Amino acid sequence: SCYHALNCYNAVADSVAQYMEENDSRETKLDLGLMRISLSEVDGILGEEEEEVQESLQFDLLSAQAGDIWAQKEVGWRALVGRGLEENHAQALDHLEAAAAVGDPDAIHNLGYMHMNGLGVEQNYTKAKGYFDKAAEHNITAAFNAL
């Protein structure tokens, strides 16, 4: 069942988070490639309770510190829109730029959104369009809508 799968996933996520915390996650590089579905994605399916948001956020923050690009994108988005974190455009920019630097199309789109709206950066439609064009190359629907 979904409930059982979620409990299993939570146990694995807790173990990884504990390992990262005990081993100074800033210096420990873990291969989180097999854990691309973060707790926050599961929350999106089942509905988010405040406690679940904080649990998934802790996992994403630890993963981002360890250099996980998906987590960088997720933390950046949360800081951009204020979901689970206080809205902080400077923090969003840092995380999204890290993910975009290695080609994450969602992060690239979100940077376009920030430039289009002047969120944490000077409003610049030319830069925004450049980001949206790059994101659209990866079939990000919101990028097509922004163009």
Image (tube, helix red, strand yellow):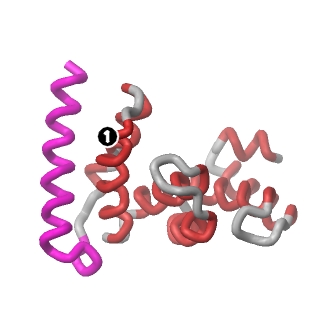
Asked whether, in this view, residue 30 is left or right of residue 69, the answer is left
| Stretch in magenta | 1-29
Asked whether, in this view, residue 122 is left or right of residue 102, the answer is right
Q: Is residue 142 above or below residue 125?
A: above
Looking at the image, can residue 135 be seen? yes
Give the residue at x 67% y 39%.
141
Q: Is the magenta stretch mostly helix, strand or loop?
A: helix
Give the residue at x 70% y 68%.
120
Looking at the image, can residue 105 be seen? no
In the rendered image, residue 2 lying in the magenta stretch gets the answer: yes
Asked whether, in this view, residue 12 is left or right of residue 103, the answer is left
Give the residue at x 37% y 52%.
57
Please state the horizontal and vertical placement of residue 143, each as a whole percent of the image. Answer: 72, 46
Return the residue at label 1.
Answer: 51
Q: Mark 1: give few (<14), some (14-19) or many (20+) Cα within 10 Å.
A: few
In the rendered image, residue 19 lying in the magenta stretch gets the answer: yes
Give the residue at x 28% y 49%.
35
Please state the horizontal and vertical placement of residue 15, each as a whole percent of the image. Answer: 13, 54
Please state the horizontal and vertical placement of residue 104, each as a whole percent of the image. Answer: 54, 59
Q: Which amino acid is tagged 1?
A: Glu
